Image: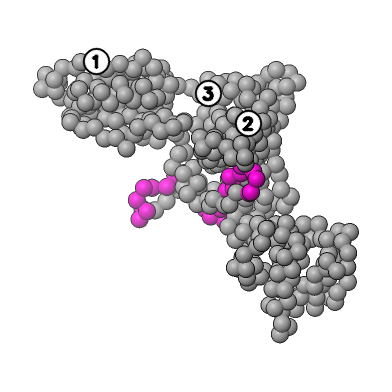
């Protein structure tokens, strides 16, 4: 495949002799001969002499940039595989650590169903969010906890190109950026003393540790049929959300893999014990175990079971593969003034109809609190009911309830 000349020029301008020789060594090339601090000769291991490259080391040479360009041009024309590897190394150095999500799936003429492609992106997104949340605290089940922090991290990531002939989502995670666990919505306000800062590379490292703990827990389960490894893995970042994302990456295919390649970005404030890339593989035989472990971790989170009644405003319709969300202005059944409730498509239709018909809603579920916001998870027995007109309710009943949303039906 012919490499565009623009790509050659960009890479040649971004490299110097030292970075080029370091990259070639990491790709298995060997140095032979040359002159100290002037130039070096490199060739692929076992290659013939005519495949060699001459790399200038003295940037004071008049033709220094031209020699760099010639070396990069020769790689692009004679060894595109090495050229692309060099380009990936340079992208990581500029953009961040590289996290790849790969799905091994049977294809039809090199193509997969559109919905499956979306599932790969959703699995990658969920994995990154789970890794970010686990960098703030370790929990078996997060729900919406640390959601703002996790999305700030995700917004600082970049999406790279996929590879031809495979189904890979490439994420470049920030290296030196700092994120705060407790950050005021008003940017002009000072950070609280317990804001808790986390550097981008720490998140990626924590994600790597959590994935390693997941593979170890799967191995332990195969030997013992015990889910204890997943419970113990919580302290290393394993969570219900992470297991669900790994499940989604594998589901529908033969296997899935998450790989991490570390950037040489000098902005990193976190030292690595090893620069070697790591990869974590999961095959479809792990799917039932991941499902059991997800349910187990969800059951470890203390919640309050409630059945509540209130007035509903619909805030987000369900989309493919994701729940919708409603807000319930509580009248009875909970001390929460408002509950945010993830709902299925059928539940959303009931809630939307109740709002349109000026009726109330009853629903059961597990109530949790994150910050100042209350959530109701695992919603069930959701039904619309007639409620007294607002004029016949006491002021205490109407204050947190219907009066705030009367006549409103907001659907995203």
Judge the density around disc 2: few (<14), some (14-19), many (≥20) Cα neighbours within 10 Å: some
Find disc 3 in the rendering and name its residue.
Answer: 298
Which one is in front, 119 or 208? Answer: 119
Q: Disc 3 versus disc 1: distance between alpha carbons?
A: 30 Å
Q: Earlier in the sequence, mark 3 or mark 1?
A: 3
**What's the colour scheme?**
one colour
The tag on residue 253 is 2
- Residue 371 in the figure: left or right of residue 409: right
The mark found on residue 351 in the picture is none
Q: Position of residue 147 (x, y in %)?
A: 45, 39
Residue at image coords 21%, 33%: 408
Task: Please report the residue visible at 69 percent of the width from the left and 73 percent of the height from the top.
Answer: 69
Real-space Cα distance between discs 3 and 2?
Answer: 25 Å
Question: Residue, x 66% and y 31% (percent of image)?
Answer: 254
Q: Is residue 20 left or right of residue 298?
A: right
Helix or strand or loop: what does disc 2 sit on? loop
- Figure check: 353 above or below 40: above
Quadrant housing residue 409: top left
């Amino acid at each position: 495949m012919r490499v565009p000349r623009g790509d050659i020029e960009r890479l040649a301008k971004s490299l110097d002799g030292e970075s080029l020789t370091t990259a070639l060594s990491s790709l298995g090339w060997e140095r032979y001969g040359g002159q100290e601090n002037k130039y070096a000769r490199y060739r692929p291991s076992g290659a013939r002499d005519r495949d060699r490259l001459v790399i200038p080391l003295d940037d004071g040479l008049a033709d220094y940039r031209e020699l760099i360009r010639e070396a990069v041009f020769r790689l692009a024309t004679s060894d595109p595989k090495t050229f692309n590897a060099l380009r990936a190394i340079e992208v990581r150095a500029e953009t961040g650590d590289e996290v790849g999500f790969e799905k091994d799936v049977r294809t039809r003429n090199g193509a997969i169903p559109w919905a499956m492609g979306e599932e790969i992106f959703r699995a990658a997104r969920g994995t990154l969010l789970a890794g970010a949340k686990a960098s703030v605290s370790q929990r078996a089940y997060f729900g919406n906890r640390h959601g703002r922090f996790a999305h700030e991290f995700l917004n600082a990531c970049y999406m790279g190109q996929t590879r031809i002939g495979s189904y890979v989502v490439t994420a470049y995670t920030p290296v030196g950026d700092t994120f705060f666990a407790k950050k005021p919505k008003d940017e002009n306000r000072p950070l609280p003393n317990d804001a808790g800062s986390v550097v981008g590379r720490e998140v990626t490292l924590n994600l790597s540790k959590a994935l390693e703990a997941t593979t170890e827990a799967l191995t332990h389960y195969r030997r013992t049929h015990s889910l204890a490894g997943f419970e113990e893995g919580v302290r290393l970042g394993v969570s219900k959300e992470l297991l669900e994302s790994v499940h989604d990456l594998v589901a529908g295919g033969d296997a899935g893999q998450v790989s991490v390649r570390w950037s040489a970005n000098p902005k990193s404030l976190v030292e690595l014990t090893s620069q070697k890339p790591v990869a974590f593989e999961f095959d479809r035989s792990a799917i039932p175990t991941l499902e059991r472990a997800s349910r187990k971790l969800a059951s470890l989170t203390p919640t309050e079971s409630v059945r509540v009644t209130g007035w509903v405003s619909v805030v987000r319709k369900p989309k493919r593969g994701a729940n919708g969300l409603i807000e319930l202005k509580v009248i009875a059944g909970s001390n929460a003034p408002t509950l945010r409730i993830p709902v299925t498509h059928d539940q959303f239709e009931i809630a939307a109809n109740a709002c349109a018909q000026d009726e109330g809603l009853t629903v059961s579920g597990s109530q949790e609190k994150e910050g100042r916001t209350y959530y109701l998870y695992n919603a069930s027995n959701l039904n619309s009911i007639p409620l007294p007109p607002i004029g016949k309710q006491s002021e205490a009943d109407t204050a947190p309830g219907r009066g705030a949303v009367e006549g409103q039906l907001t659907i995203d």
